Image (cartoon, rainbow, N blue to C red):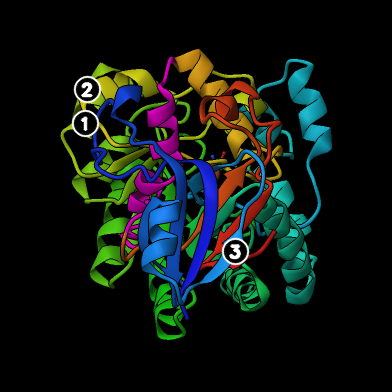
Amino acid sequence: MKKLVGPFTQILPLSGLPLKGAIADDHLQIILNAGVLVEGGVIVKVGDFEELRKVNGEAEIEEITGQQVLLPGFADCHTHLCFAGDRSKDYALRIAGKSYLEIAKSGGGIWDSVTQTRQASKNELAELLLQRIGRHAKDGVTTIEIKSGYGLKIEEEIKQLCAIQLAAASSTVDLITTCLAAHILPKDFNGPASEYLEYVLNNLLPKIKKDNLASRVDIFIEESAFNVSNATCYLQVAKQMGFDVTVHADQFTTGGSEVAINVGAVSADHLEASGEKEIKLIAASNTVAVALPGASIGLGMDFAPARKLLNAGASLAIASDWNPGSAPMGDLLMQASVLSAYEKLTTAEVFAGLTFRAAKALNLHDRGLLENGKLADFQSYPCGDYREILYHQGKLKPGKVWKKGKEIL
Ligand code: NIG
Ligand code: FE
């Protein structure tokens, strides 16, 4: 049965915009008094509401009242939502002047979240996940990537991935799972980083593949985590096994983005430390640059050079990095709005980075645009002009959210 949703004051389908490079706002297509025709969870047509109504007399009408602007649902292509506990003590130390790396060295940091997450059961983790997913869904996020990486041994990584699978069974939005067993070298692993990565490659990734627990593999390349040569070998093997690969790259020091490009990663995420050389390499590649303003805000550090990346021709996505340490806020739209103000991004670039470019970072080509054949994932904002959305810096929330054509909020 067909359903016609509308009329919306404005629909921004984001169609016809490039996957890479800068986008001026006058390239945004804006359809006035518009409707979306949906069938079987997929968009059939977007256009003038009255015309669609005339031609589709048999369609059920879902009537929209008042001023409403419709956008595609957001894809948050980088989160660490599967964790227990919190790191508020780390945060207090950080705002008082201690660095992320100093805190990690003195017993806080990622290892603290590993300890807290290991103490939680699979069901408890799934419960916590569903609360966070629910919050994100209300904020218009209809696809969420979620990493493991707070288990850091076989059975604990599997527990995290199974918790995500369990949450996915009752989640209203799509979850894309990534194995981040290579987050840091675990303190209780007896051996060097290269041996730990071997252990993960031989004992964890085959299991994940067999049970379809994740489709992607990530690694943190940094002085405090894994080096360029170990990471390159690890990602090459993971790719041969059939995983999409992605990298936590250039967060504090460079090196990671070059690995990402050399191995053909779908995305290189963070990039706060990327310089001219890295920007050029990323722009010339098919790897999506993912800015994580939530981590910059959480750490009080520079933003990724989003403007320069776009000007050089890169594809730029924006994600929340929601995690208990560097990015505890988890408000994607607020973070994207702040990034745009500091980096001088157009509204079109921000919307593209939260939708179809973020979907590309996840290697998903069926969403992020409101056009024929794409998933009917969309969200409406109670305003009369799309520019009000970033103007309110994240405080204007969607009034309604649809996943595969069904209202979830
Ligand atoms: O993307 N940089 C490494 N990993 C996460 C932080 C995780 C944590 O602090 O718990 C990040 O910022
Ligand atoms: Fe991260």
Front residue (pair 62, 285): 62
Whether 237 is drawn above or below 29: the answer is below
Rendering quarter of residue 124: bottom right
> Where, quadrant-wise, is the C terminus in this rendering?
bottom right
Determine contact: label 3, label 2, CB under 8 Å. Answer: no
Residue that mark 3 sits on: 62
Assign a secondary structure to mark 1.
helix
Front residue (pair 54, 349): 54
Identity of the residue drawn at 62% across and 53% down: 64
Residue that mark 2 sits on: 312
Rendering quarter of residue 6: bottom right
Q: Nearer the viewer, mark 1 or mark 3?
A: 3
Identity of the residue drawn at 52% across and 16% down: 341
Amino acid bearing label 3:
Glu
Q: Position of residue 22 (x, y in %)?
A: 27, 25
Determine contact: label 1, label 2, CB under 8 Å. Answer: yes
349 inside magenta stretch: yes
Q: Nearer the viewer, mark 3 or mark 2?
A: 3
Q: Which segment did they paint magenta?
A: 344-371
Identity of the residue drawn at 25% across and 32% down: 314
Whether 138 is drawn above or below 258: the answer is below
- The CA span between labels 3 and 2 is 43 Å
Decide: few, some or many residues near mark 3? Use Cα within 10 Å; few <14, some 14-19, many ≥20. some
Residue that mark 1 sits on: 283
Identity of the residue drawn at 51% across and 51% down: 73
**1 or 2: tag closer to the N-terminus:** 1
Assign a secondary structure to mark 2.
helix
Assign a secondary structure to mark 3.
strand
Amino acid bearing label 2:
Ala
